[in-house]
Amino acid sequence: MLDHAEIARILDIMGNRNRRRIIELLRQKPCFVTEISDRLVLSPKAVIEHLQLMEREQILTFRLDERRRKYYSLARDITIDVSLNWLDQGQNLKPDRMGELRQALFILRKMVTAREEITESLRNIEQNIDGQIREIVRQGSEILGQDGEIDLLIALAHSDLSARELMELTGVPEDELWPGLEDLKEKRIVEREGKTFRLCGAHAR
């Protein structure tokens, strides 16, 4: 049984729409960070922050695959039941319930239709992204020959990231990360600005 402090923390977590979306996605299957980022159209940085918060609360857990990427899954599921009851203030004070119901159903229909259109569009985009990643892996294997460097490039194609964020996102260990970044800098594919790494201008277009 949760105490009041734990319930308050859970409600704070679930009060964020994107964290609810991440939990809903992980109910379907374990995912790694870039997969969550692509499917929910969120920046990798934002995804990492949400995952770390829910990991601290022991809502999520992860495993490492052969490429040392973190696959996140639910450690425990959350179900919240909310009920709204009208206070008994007299029949005349209640709104037109039937009119509100019709309006709510009309809005729901429009939202469901919009969701179906967006879902289909996202499904096509996801297929294109998967195909593009496969092509990058193929080309990178021929040119670079290092899986870790390919993972770094794919991560930086999503967003400009710090070294720590790159390690979190790709699972590339620190002793491989820095030589890989230096090699990519020498090849003029990656550049550094302060603590942030990004794809060089011509490659980022």
Image (spheres, rainbow, N blue to C red):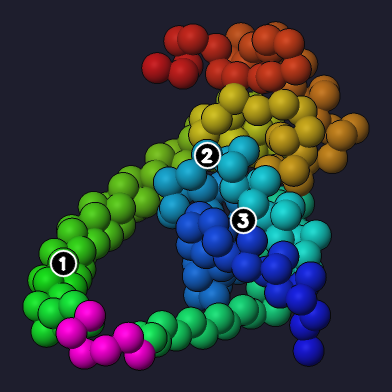
Q: Tell whether 136 sits left or right of 119.
A: right
Amino acid, disc 3: Phe
Check whether the beta carbons of the residues at disc 3 and disc 2 lie within 8 A of each other: no
Dividing the picture into quadrants, the one containing residue 190 is top right
Residue at x-position 69% and y-position 12%: 192
Residues in magenta, as a range: 88-93
**In the depicted structure, whether residue 168 falls above or below residue 199:** below
| N-terminal label among 2 and 1 | 2
Give the distance between the C-alpha atoms of the residues marked 1 and 3, in whole angstroms.
34 Å
Residue extending farthest right: 175
Residue at x-position 80% and y-position 60%: 56
Amino acid, disc 2: Ser
For label 1, the SS is helix
For label 2, the SS is loop
For label 3, the SS is strand
Q: Which residue is mark 1?
A: 107
Amino acid, disc 1: Ile
Residue 178, horizontal then vertical, whole percent: 82, 24
Residue 175, magenta (yes or no): no
Dividing the picture into quadrants, the one containing residue 151 is top right
Q: Tell whether 162 sits left or right of 36.
A: right
Q: Which residue is mark 2?
A: 43
Q: Can residue 101 be seen at all in this image of the molecule?
A: no
Give the distance between the C-alpha atoms of the residues marked 3 and 2, in whole angstroms.
13 Å
Q: Nearer the viewer, mark 2 or mark 1?
A: 1
